[in-house]
């Protein structure tokens, strides 16, 4: 019964891992993977020494780092806020609305961004009350990261709060009563009862998010790119796609992709190690 | 509740409600905007923005989008890809999860490690693409359905589920002389409806909303799923000329293409948004089980 999953994994997961050795070759489609010449780390050196490297690397890092810093606390705050809603029905309905954007596809979200943020779109119409110049949100590199990160929060924060909401529901109300009798106010109770309850989950979510810090999604970044916002919008995954599948430089592109994966694994292990130290031995592994 | 709220507490609670209301508004206002805009008369929308007078409304956007062959084909393709993908994913995950939940399976640890490695490390885009190409799957529906069908997360999810099924049940059936296949089909599967449902929903929604695999593997526009059609309408601004009659002037075309975009967003997102409240508890269940590892 394990066979289907095993075969598919070997072919479609381990196959590409084997195929990734083309990163170390001067790949020619005619000679195939085995027949092509070994070139060692040539393709990696080519990437690391190219003028694009710093820009693309930093774009990737900044996008996910800022995304993590801005995005990580929002679901926690939402959950703590929802937890204060005493009427179960009201709480359910708020959750229902907050989760909804999670079911809207990236294409549609980006499409909406293009419409809303266009020079004649509703956001600019609003700003027109204060200034005459329309703001070119989509074409200016300086806005790209904000648009990416804030729209990510819009789409996913509600959904991401589920897990914290569930953990908070397990807090024994007696704890709150006792603390209340001892004179603790609401904020103190949140800080000393609610937060410690969800701390292990926060740690796991954080490790997973930080571990994927370089694996920020291709899908949205690629759709949000315009010819003029590229200085901020070009990230490693989109670069890999362009040089690999659009320009056909397979070996070089694989090297860039592999470089990215390795950084990811290192990040994951490092963050897990640090969190373990801080979190009394509670890490992912 | 015995909790007595001090004045500070009441102030914080009021603040809390305010922020929650703001959060909800931020989430739904853009959606409401799109829905209303999609119902507007194109020229009114362009000249004065949203209007709440019914006389300023029209269904032109919907007429255009629903009579667009690419859109219809995309919709059909998306239904097919999402359903086929969901069925395959569920089959593969359930079988693997069941096998891995059984303590008699030898080499369980090795298999688990083999699966888990793929969660953290992959060969990358180009090697995957070359593999799909070499297997001759390019420009076939299989390229979209098969490579992503095995997902470690789903396997872990179903393994966790099956671990919760009491072992005595299987043993009892075994004593009664039922074969392994019979035990799985007659006893375990009927108990697995929740996990099957959760996995299928996740897979369906994920595939319905994705465009990337289709974009790289499918050149033939006849095979394109809805999201790729939407991409050309919403992002690449390629409103199919056949949607707008050639007689119309450029200005008229621009107006119509705006309204077509809004209608396209509604038509493509509405099915999921309408379904989701009914399935909400299953989605939540999926998140919960997943978090247990």
Image: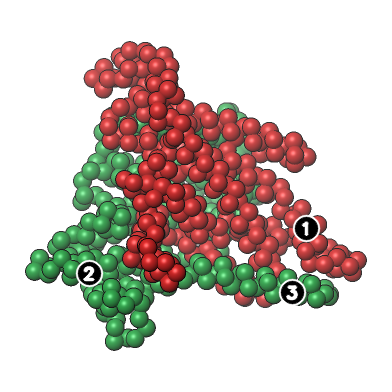
Q: Is residue B158 left or right of residue B64?
A: right
Foreground pick, B279 / A225? A225
Residue A169 higher or lower than B166, as above or below = below
Identity of the residue furthest to the left in this view: B247
| Residue for point 45% across, 44% down | A217
Residues at marks 2 and 3, CA–CA distance in whole angstroms: 49 Å
Residue B262 drawn at (x, y percent): 32, 67
The quadrant holding residue A4 is: top left
Q: Is residue B126 left or right of residue A61?
A: left
Q: Which chain is red?
A: A
Residue A4 visible from this viewpoint: no
Q: Is residue B11 left or right of residue A130?
A: right
- Tell me whether circle 2 and circle 1 mark residues in contact (CB < 8 Å): no
Residue A146 visible from this viewpoint: yes
Circle 1 residue: A191
Residue B242 drawn at (x, y percent): 14, 63
| Residue for point 13% across, 68% down | B249
| Residue for point 26% across, 37% down | B138
Q: Residues within 10 Å of mark 1 (few under 14, many from 20)?
A: few
Q: Which chain is green?
A: B
Circle 2 residue: B256
């Amino acid at each position: 019964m394990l066979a289907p999953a095993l075969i598919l994994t070997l072919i479609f997961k381990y196959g590409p891992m084997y195929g990734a050795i083309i990163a170390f070759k001067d790949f020619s489609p005619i000679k195939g993977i085995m027949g092509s010449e070994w070139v060692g780390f040539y393709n990696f050196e080519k990437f690391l020494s190219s003028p694009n490297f710093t820009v693309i690397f930093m774009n990737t890092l900044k996008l996910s780092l800022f995304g993590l810093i801005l995005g990580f606390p929002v679901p926690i705050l939402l959950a703590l806020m929802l937890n204060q809603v005493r009427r179960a029905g009201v709480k359910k309905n708020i959750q229902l609305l907050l989760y909804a954007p999670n079911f809207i596809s990236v294409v549609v979200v980006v499409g909406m961004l293009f419409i809303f943020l266009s020079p004649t779109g509703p956001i600019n119409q609003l700003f027109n009350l204060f200034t005459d110049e329309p703001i070119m949100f989509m074409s200016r590199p300086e806005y790209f990261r904000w648009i990416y990160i804030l729209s990510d929060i819009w789409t996913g924060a509600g959904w991401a709060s589920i897990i914290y909401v569930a953990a908070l529901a397990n807090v024994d109300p007696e704890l709150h009563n006792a603390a209340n009798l001892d004179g603790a106010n609401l904020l103190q109770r949140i800080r000393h009862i609610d937060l410690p309850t969800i701390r292990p989950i926060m740690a796991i979510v954080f490790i997973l998010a930080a571990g994927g810090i370089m694996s920020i999604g291709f899908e949205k970044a690629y759709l949000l790119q315009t010819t003029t916002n590229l200085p901020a919008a070009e990230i490693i995954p989109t670069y890999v796609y362009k040089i690999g599948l659009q320009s056909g430089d397979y070996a070089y592109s694989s090297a860039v992709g592999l470089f990215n994966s390795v950084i990811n694994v290192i990040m994951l292990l490092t963050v897990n190690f640090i969190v373990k130290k801080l979190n009394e031995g509670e890490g992912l592994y | 509740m015995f909790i007595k709220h001090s004045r500070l507490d009441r102030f914080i609670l009021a603040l809390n409600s305010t922020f929650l209301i703001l959060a909800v508004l931020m989430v739904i206002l853009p959606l409401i905007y799109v829905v209303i805009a999609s119902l507007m008369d194109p020229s009114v929308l362009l000249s004065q923005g949203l209007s709440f007078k019914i006389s300023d409304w029209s269904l032109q956007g919907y007429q255009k989008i629903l009579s667009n062959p690419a859109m219809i084909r995309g919709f059909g393709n998306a239904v097919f890809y999402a359903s086929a993908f969901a069925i395959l994913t569920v089959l593969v995950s359930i079988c693997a999860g069941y096998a891995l939940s059984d303590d008699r399976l030898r080499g369980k640890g090795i298999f688990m490690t083999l699966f888990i490695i793929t969660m953290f490390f992959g060969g990358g885009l180009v090697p995957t693409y070359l593999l799909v190409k070499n297997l001759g799957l390019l420009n076939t529906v299989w390229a979209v359905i098969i490579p992503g069908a095995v997902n470690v997360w789903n396997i872990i999810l179903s393994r966790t589920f099956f671990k919760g099924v009491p072992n005595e049940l299987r043993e009892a059936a075994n004593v009664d002389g039922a074969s392994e296949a019979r035990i799985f089909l007659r006893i375990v599967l009927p108990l697995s409806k929740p996990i099957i449902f959760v996995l299928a929903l996740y897979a369906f929604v994920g595939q319905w909303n994705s465009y990337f695999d289709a974009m790289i593997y499918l050149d033939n526009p006849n095979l394109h799923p809805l999201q790729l059609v939407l991409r050309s309408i919403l992002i690449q601004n390629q409103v199919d000329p056949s949607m707008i009659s050639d007689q119309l002037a450029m200005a008229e075309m621009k107006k119509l293409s705006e309204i077509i975009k809004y209608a396209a967003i509604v038509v493509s997102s509405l099915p999921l948004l309408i379904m989701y409240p009914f399935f909400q508890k299953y989605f939540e269940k999926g998140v919960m089980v997943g978090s247990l590892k």
